[in-house]
Image: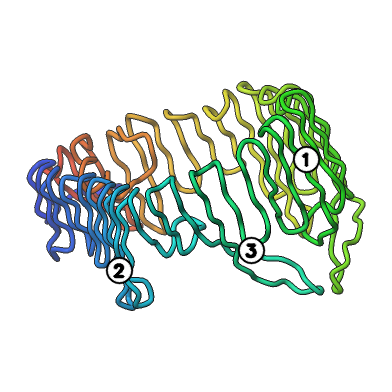
Amino acid sequence: MLASVLLLSAAFQVGPFYEQDCGAKYVAARPFYAREGEVVDIAWPLFTSHRDWWRFCLLASRQDYSNGDYQFSIVPFWFNGCDRGRGYAGLFPLVGRHPHIAAMYDVKFALWPLWHSYRMPRSCWRDGQRREEWLETNSILFPFLSWRSDGSWSLWPIYGVNRQRESVHRYVLWPFVTWAHYESDRDTAGEGYSWTLFPLWSRVRRQFEQQDSFLPPFFSVASSQSRRSSQDGEVEHDSADSFRLRCPWPFFEYESSPRCWRLGIWPFYERVVDYDYKSGSESSRVTRYGWKLVELYDDQTRIFPFYASGRGYTRLWPLWESESHDDETRMRVLGLFPIRYVPQIDRNWAKFWTFYENRSSPVYVDHSLLWGIFRWRTFKQ
């Protein structure tokens, strides 16, 4: 039996346009302003700020760090900041230095693409131990002329040499003729060679890997053997084999390995089973239909964008969605945004199409109808 009472709201709300909780931790004047905790949105997605960062229109942003460093940028033209007490700045493409962009460190450029340089960390095994080293790359008239501190260089697309740990890669008239020589390495497929005569044929022959491709990447057959490294760093053979067939890619692909089994007939069907690396037991599996329109997991079902369920979440787009966390369940009607809960959408826009919602606890259910104009509480017995 349910008992209903008028709910003395802990929030003040005027339709979908204004909302504020009693503690003033949440305030929204939609769609122009919203504040939740330390996050402030102004006409989102135009402007968002936090305690130590702000972002305007995905173009201008500033990030402050606890040690006093900061970074400011106007993409892609200007950046400046302080890194470990050392200032940096750049006016792209004229001149500049940046301490870290993606995986590149100490990036410098002048009249780009006329000249740029950067460093990247690299791990390697020497004398049975893993060592870290820095590789510096310089380029003039990118991508035509470049050279690296390990002896690699390139006069693209005529000829180039690229050294990568245990391997040396070369090309002539890239991408038509490429080849590589591999030495033994504890983390790779071992010694051997590879070559490609694009677009006709390619071959790989290494200690633990073999592959032949016809009209690459459309037709290929590959096999490999798992390997493990002993405590002294020597590579040992393991009996577990891997096999992959593409005929033609991406329309048909079959793969079997100690870590994965996969059959794909694109775009109609795909079956993937993953195995635990250590125990070899099955860790997850999924069946897909229509590429990724229908995905069936052990604990989830997705039919994009109309239906999703699993792990305490259910969405029937665009009609309703519900989500459970611990002992609380939240349900709303309508749910027009086709992606699971996004805080910025929820703060600034979701209320415009949410005509009814409720929050359920083990004791009671709070209801809100027509953007909070009508509120009531029902008790569970």
Query: Is residue 381 at least partly visible in the picture?
Result: no
* Label ID, residue 203: none
Name which residue type carries label 3: Arg
Describe the element under mark 3 as helix, strand or loop: strand
How far across and how far down the image is residue 45, in percent? Answer: 23, 44
Q: Nearer the viewer, mark 1 or mark 3?
A: 1
Residue at 67% across, 54% down? 152
Report which residue position mark 2 lands on. Answer: 70
**Number of callouts in the render?**
3
What's the distance in space between the residues labelled 1 and 3, CA to CA? 22 Å
What's the distance in space between the residues labelled 1 and 2, CA to CA? 45 Å
The crowd level at tag 1 (other Cα within 10 Å; few <14, some 14-19, many 20+) is some
Residue at 71% across, 39% down? 171
* 377 in relation to 304, above or below: below
Describe the element under mark 1 as helix, strand or loop: strand
What's the distance in space between the residues labelled 3 and 2, CA to CA? 27 Å
Q: Nearer the viewer, mark 1 or mark 2?
A: 1
* 178 in relation to 61, above or below: above
Whether residues under marks 1 and 3 lie with C-beta atoms below 8 angstroms apart, the answer is no
Residue at 22% across, 34% down? 353
* Res 337 quadrant in image: top left
Name which residue type carries label 2: Tyr
188 and 41: which is toward the camera: 188
Q: Is residue 121 left or right of residue 88?
A: right
295 and 112: which is toward the camera: 112
Report which residue position mark 1 lands on. Answer: 179
How far across and how far down the image is residue 121, in percent? Answer: 59, 64
Report which residue position mark 3 lands on. Answer: 122
Describe the element under mark 2 as helix, strand or loop: strand
Q: Say whether disc 1 or disc 2 marks the residue closer to the N-terminus.
A: 2
81 and 213: which is toward the camera: 81
